[in-house]
């Protein structure tokens, strides 16, 4: 489940306590933690609700003007059930702090190198981490679809791979595209020398 930057920040501020989604089946469960642009958001609960039972007060608690705005935003089949997903802010995203670190020790560089090698070995398409890091470094703030074309890949698999790099603190996801984090830039410099 993806939360927009606006909603993620409202959850972090305690203003938004729920969101609504229409899905064929639930895509999250209570206890799931989402890494968002505003920090970690925890799924507290998920309950089915009839779309016509969503009130304006429910919409306000979801950061929207009224129930009509909420129901108009639903994707998927009109026959799919609607879910009320209760959320809470669980704290800052530890990856953000890690991604800002530029003072990498030799041990840090070895650990990152080993983690990237594990990702490369686990991939069905073969080694990809160096190529994706280089593409993001060379094309910051470029849409995922365009980076995928540059690499001869499909957008969805590229986005999954970039998320793996982000989990290591090497990249940042932006409103449009990606960029190498300060930690990622420090790693690239260290691995080139």
Image (tube, rainbow, N blue to C red):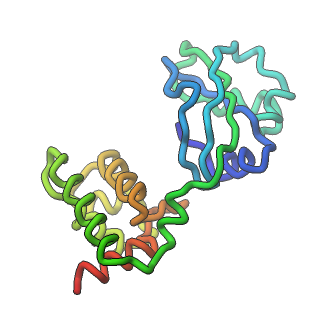
72 is higher (above) or lower (below) than 91: above
Residue 25: image x %, image y %?
49, 18
Determine the residue positioned at 79% across, 31% down.
59
Residue sitting nearer the eye, 132 or 70: 132
Determine the residue positioned at 30% across, 72% down.
107
Determine the residue positioned at 39% across, 77% down.
104
Residue 37 falls in which quadrant of the image?
A: bottom right
Quadrant containing the C terminus is bottom left
87 with respect to 30 (left or right): right
Residue 11 falls in which quadrant of the image?
A: top right
Residue 66: image x %, image y %?
82, 32
91 with respect to 157 (left or right): right
Determine the residue positioned at 58% across, 25% down.
30
Please give the count of numbered marks on the rendered protein: 0
27 is higher (above) or lower (below) than 183: above
Residue sitting nearer the eye, 60 or 42: 42
Please, which residue is most extreme toward the right here?
Answer: 57
109 with respect to 171 (left or right): left
14 is higher (above) or lower (below) than 67: below
Residue sitting nearer the eye, 16 or 79: 16
Please, which residue is most extreme toward the bottom here?
Answer: 193
Residue 22: image x %, image y %?
58, 23
């Amino acid at each position: 489940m993806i939360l927009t930057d606006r909603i993620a920040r409202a959850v972090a501020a305690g203003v938004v306590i729920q969101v609504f989604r229409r899905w064929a089946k639930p895509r999250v469960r209570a206890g799931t933690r989402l890494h968002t642009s505003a920090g970690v958001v925890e799924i507290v609960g998920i309950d089915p609700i009839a779309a016509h039972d969503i009130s304006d007060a429910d919409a306000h608690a979801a950061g929207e003007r009224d129930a009509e705005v909420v129901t108009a935003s639903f994707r998927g089949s009109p026959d799919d059930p609607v879910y009320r997903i209760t959320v809470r802010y669980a704290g800052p995203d530890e990856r953000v702090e890690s991604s800002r670190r530029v003072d990498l020790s030799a041990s840090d560089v070895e650990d990152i190198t080993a983690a990237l090698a594990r990702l490369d070995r686990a991939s069905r398409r073969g080694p990809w981490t160096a190529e994706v890091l280089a593409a993001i470094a060379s094309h910051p703030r470029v849409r995922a679809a365009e980076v995928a074309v540059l690499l001869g890949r499909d957008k969805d698999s590229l986005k999954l791979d970039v998320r793996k790099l982000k989990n290591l603190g090497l990249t940042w996801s932006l409103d449009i595209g990606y960029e190498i984090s300060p930690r990622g830039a420090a790693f690239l410099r260290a691995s080139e020398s």
